Image (cartoon, rainbow, N blue to C red):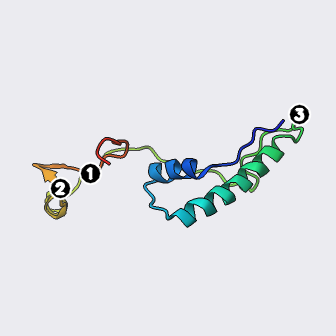
Amino acid sequence: MSLNMSLTTQKVEEIARLARLELTEVEKMMYAEQLSVVLEYIEMLDEVKTDGVAETCQVTGLEDVVREDKVEACDLKVVKKIIAAFPNKKGNLLKVKAVFDYESE
């Protein structure tokens, strides 16, 4: 079962745009070739029969340590210092570049 998972330079351009990476034409061709090899390997692994094999996501016995996400009070001087140092703000709001705003690119 072949899915033909090779990447075109156009797909690499799209991936680079989503990752906000600027690539040269040489890099686009190189990554298209390298990523295609990785995808072909993944396709080959898809042919392995895994029926009855338990999922394994961690084999060392380590466990994730998580903590509750909670708001903690911060010294007002520190807050003012951060706001004053931020380049783009409106009042106490800090303006950052949109992650998913493709219109402004």
Tell whether 7 sits left or right of 93: right
Tell whether 94 sits left or right of 6: left
Crowdedness near tag 2: few (<14), some (14–19) or many (≥20) residues, C-alpha within 10 Å: few
Report how far apart the C-alphas of labels 1 and 3 lie in the structure.
Answer: 48 Å
Q: Name the residue under label 1.
A: 96
Q: Is residue 52 above or below residue 27?
A: above
Residue 34 versus residue 100: which sits nearer the camera?
34
Q: Where is residue 31 in the image (x, y as percent from the top left)?
A: 61, 60
Q: Where is residue 79 in the image (x, y as percent from the top left)?
A: 18, 57
Q: What residue type is labelled 3?
A: Gly
Q: Is mark 1 on a helix, strand or loop?
A: loop
Which of disc 3 and disc 1 is earlier in sequence?
3
Image quadrant in which the N terminus is located: top right
Which of disc 3 and disc 2 is earlier in sequence?
3
Residue 75 position by quadrant = bottom left
Q: Is mark 2 on a helix, strand or loop?
A: loop
Report how far apart the C-alphas of labels 2 and 3 lie in the structure.
Answer: 55 Å
Crowdedness near tag 1: few (<14), some (14–19) or many (≥20) residues, C-alpha within 10 Å: few
Q: Which amino acid does label 2 sit on?
A: Asn
Q: Mark 2 points at which residue?
A: 88
Q: Name the residue under label 3.
A: 52
- Asked if disc 1 and disc 2 are in contact, CB closer than 8 Å, the reply is yes
Crowdedness near tag 3: few (<14), some (14–19) or many (≥20) residues, C-alpha within 10 Å: few
